[in-house]
Amino acid sequence: MSQADTLRLATHHLPPYQVVNGDALSGSMIDLMQCSLIEMGQAYQVEVRPINRAIKELQAGKFDGVFVLNRTAERDSFATASEPLIVTYRSLFSVKTIDAELHSPAMKELQIGVLHGSAMHSWLTKHGYPNVLTRYDYHILFELMQLERIDAIVAPFEIYENEKDHGHVTRKIETRHLSQANLSGYFSPSWLDKHPDFLPRFNAALAVCK
């Protein structure tokens, strides 16, 4: 298979979905992508980038695809999403009960932690939350929340489960599901133009591998 037919993918460190340990990649979404691409007989290579850089380099044509990303209208404007790799919940985590309505003045007074460059980062900014704290690692955000330096975190539910499973949650955490979140792979128009049967085959392989 020629180099032009090798799918160039970017991903980002996001346990438990993608776990970077030196040169080794593991995690549930790494396993799912690998299974699906092998099922298709598709050659691929994966590089690790911070999420914002990965998205910019997808737009610039350096990569043919990025995973996993929350599906948004903005991302739909420059790339095409696969069927969801995972359907999860976008959840609010806190050490104290938060009853405030979403987007209410009381909610916007809270200092809320999110992953830098994530769809939730953009969503909170778009809705006028003035006290958003961003970090590049959810583990740091959970530490800050348990030290009560921030009020809450918004993240996919599995992020909390991973922190808990690894012994990083030492306090009782309140969980409130805000909405469903579809996490997908995004593929560039140039790759899909050159390989028009790729996305249907990929989606079919996903169904086999899940």
Image (cartoon, rainbow, N blue to C red):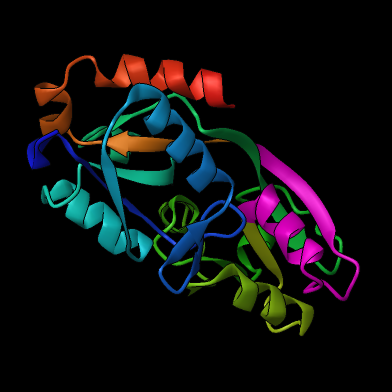
Above or below for 69 versus 52: above
Above or below for 22 versus 43: below
| Place of residue 147 in the rendered image (x, y in percent of width and height, measured from the top left) | 76, 85
| Place of residue 186 in the rendered image (x, y in percent of width and height, measured from the top left) | 32, 37
Q: Nearer the viewer, residue 13 or 107?
A: 13
Residue 48 picture quarter: bottom left
Q: Nearer the viewer, residue 146 or 10?
A: 10
Residue drawn at (66%, 64%) of the image: 153
Which residue appears farthest toward the right when viewing the image? Answer: 172
Instruction: Locate the N terminus and report the quarter of the image it occupies.
Output: top left
**Is 192 positioned to the left or the right of 106 in the image?**
left
Whether residue 58 is visible to the viewer of this picture, yes or no, is: yes
Q: Is residue 170 magenta?
A: yes
Q: How many marks?
A: 0
Q: Nearer the viewer, residue 113 or 8?
A: 8
Q: Is residue 49 magenta?
A: no
| Place of residue 130 in the rendered image (x, y in percent of width and height, measured from the top left) | 50, 68
Whether residue 71 is visible to the viewer of this picture, yes or no, is: no
* Magenta-colored span: 155-180
Instruction: Locate the C terminus and report the quarter of the image it occupies.
Output: top right
| Place of residue 8 in the rendered image (x, y in percent of width and height, measured from the top left) | 22, 46
Residue drawn at (31%, 61%) of the image: 52
**Is 45 positioned to the left or the right of 1 in the image?**
right
Which residue appears farthest toward the front when viewing the image? Answer: 1
**Is 88 positioned to the left or the right of 182 in the image?**
right
Q: Nearer the viewer, residue 166 or 88?
A: 166
